[in-house]
Amino acid sequence: MNNNKHTKLLRTIGLAAAAALATLSVMAGNDHRTHPSEYFLQEGDLPNSAYVLPAPPDSGSVALYNDMDRYNWGKSLRNTERGDTAASDARVNGNGVPEAFSEAFGVVIDSHTPEILKLIIGMREDAGDLATRDAKVHYDRQRPFIFFAEETCNPEQQHELSGNGSYPSGHTSIGWATALVLAEINPERQNEILRRGYEMGQSRVICGYHYQSDVDAGRITGSMAVARLHADPAFQAQLARAKEEFRRLKQAGKVAKGTPLPTPTTSD
């Protein structure tokens, strides 16, 4: 084996080992009791994603070939305008989620919209962590950038995320759950909001952080989280406050109207 291949193999094995070890400690324990500003729910409140979701694609399956094909599709877009958006989405962490949805929502979601902001931040890890935790730990799927030993569009996060299973995509789950809730608050802009939520998931494929099947599963866990949150009294109360805040904003003429739909395309 030549030195380049040997180095590449050792790097792949090392990243995989780090991921396996980190997965054991990175997920467990956090919920509303430890981080009340980022969760409405407690561990065990949400359905078990390892039970609800099918297993990720098997080696040699048609579904896995599709994942590989979509990985290459994503790489082909990185040096484009869509790739720039994907790279920006990859850097959306913490309180950046409301900002990422502000244009689609029709009003800036920040400290000037405290009730909407509290709602979106407060449900973030219900969708991104609790809804995906069981499947991530159970399947511990290797991320594509580790498998291919290639850089993502946002290399500074690779070490951190190498310790977190690829299936399902937590970022996608957050994005889709956020889109569903914001579309409920502002149905007049549901097309823009849901499209933005969909794009955030596809950005994970373009950046090389997830396979397409991870993203597809993330939309299921995001929907799962929203369904369960609607049964939670604290979430219900905060949602009501957010809707009332939005009603006042709209009455004051501070919400952008929906735009005509563009001609449908085949692009993602």
Image (cartoon, rainbow, N blue to C red):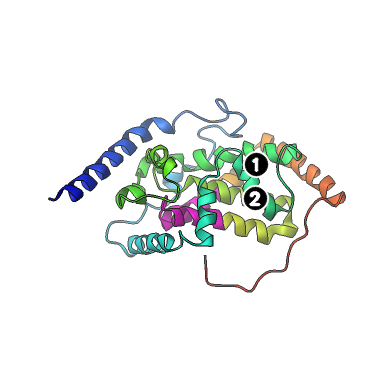
Q: Give the residues drawn in magenta, as a range.
A: 199-223
**Label 1 or label 2, whichever comes before in sequence order:** 2
Q: Quadrant of residue 78?
A: bottom left
Tell me the amino acid under the disc marked 1.
Ile
Q: Position of residue 121 (x, y in %)?
A: 63, 38
In the drawing, does residue 138 fall left or right of residue 172?
left
Tag 1 secondary structure: helix
Discs 1, 2 touching: Cβ within 8 Å: yes
Q: Residues within 10 Å of mark 1 (few under 14, many from 20)?
A: many
Query: Is there any visible trace of residue 224 in the rendered image?
Result: no
Which residue lies at the image location 22% right of the left edge and 42% below the top edge? 10
Which residue lies at the image location 55% right of the left edge and 32% below the top edge? 42
Which residue lies at the image location 38% right of the left edge and 62% below the top edge? 72
In the drawing, does residue 64 fall left or right of residue 154?
left
Query: 43 or 242, which lies in front?
Result: 242
User: In the rendering, which numbered label is found on residue 28?
Assistant: none
Residue lying farthest to the right in this orientation: 252
Q: Image height check: is 176 above or below 156?
A: below
Which residue lies at the image location 39% right of the left edge and 30% below the top edge? 25
Tell me the amino acid under the disc marked 2.
Phe
Magenta residue check for 158: no
Q: Position of residue 262 (x, y in %)?
A: 66, 71
User: In the rendering, which numbered label is found on residue 120?
Assistant: 1
Query: 1 or 123, which lies in front?
Result: 1
Q: Image height check: is 89 above or below 126?
A: below
Q: Residues within 10 Å of mark 2 (few under 14, many from 20)?
A: many
In the drawing, does residue 259 fall left or right of residue 63?
right
The overriding secondary structure of the stretch rendered in magenta is: helix
- Say which residue label 2 marks: 101
